[in-house]
């Protein structure tokens, strides 16, 4: 198993452990159509989504 304990930027205070945050977009049939790169585990989902820039190319009709 990969030991990430010494990487404080990956530590989630909420979950009391280290990890990464990955955002995944699925179509209505459940097929993955986009996967973000990993961000620090301490980042909130909203911050991870903003960092992914997925929503930058979508207009109001797509959200």
Image: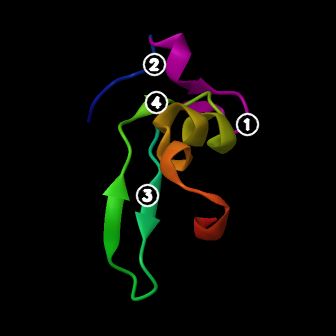
Of the image marks 4 and 2, the number of the one nearer the N terminus: 2
Of the image marks 4 and 1, the number of the one nearer the N terminus: 1
Disc 4 versus disc 1: nearer the observer: 4
Quadrant for the C terminus, please.
bottom right
In space, the residues marked 2 and 3 are separated at their CA atoms by 25 Å
Q: Residue at x 49, y 48 (%)?
A: 57
| Label 4 secondary element | strand
Q: Which color mode does the image show?
A: rainbow
Q: Is residue 10 magenta?
A: yes
Q: Residue at x 44, y 63 (%)?
A: 25
Label 2 belongs to which residue? 5
Is the residue 23 above or below the residue 31 in the image? above
> Callout 2: few (<14), some (14-19), or many (20+) C-alpha neighbours within 10 Å?
few
Label 3 belongs to which residue? 24
Q: Residue at x 46, y 85 (%)?
A: 28
Q: Is residue 6 left or right of residue 17?
A: left
Is the residue 50 above or below the residue 25 in the image? above
Label 4 belongs to which residue? 39
Mark 3 touches mark 4? (CB < 8 Å): no
In space, the residues marked 1 and 2 are separated at their CA atoms by 15 Å
Disc 3 versus disc 1: nearer the observer: 3
Of the image marks 3 and 4, the number of the one nearer the N terminus: 3
Is the residue 60 above or below the residue 15 in the image? below
Task: Pick whichever, 53 or 11, lies toward us.
Answer: 53
| Label 3 secondary element | strand
Label 1 belongs to which residue? 14
Quadrant for the N terminus, please.
top left
> Callout 4: few (<14), some (14-19), or many (20+) C-alpha neighbours within 10 Å?
many
Q: Is residue 62 left or right of residue 19?
A: right
| Label 1 secondary element | loop
């Amino acid at each position: 198993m990969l030991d990430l304990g010494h990487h404080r930027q990956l530590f989630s205070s909420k979950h009391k452990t280290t990890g990464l945050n990955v955002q995944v977009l699925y179509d209505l049939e459940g097929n993955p159509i986009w996967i973000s790169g990993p961000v620090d585990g301490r980042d909130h989902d909203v911050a991870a989504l903003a960092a992914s820039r997925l929503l930058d190319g979508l207009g109001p009709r797509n959200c």
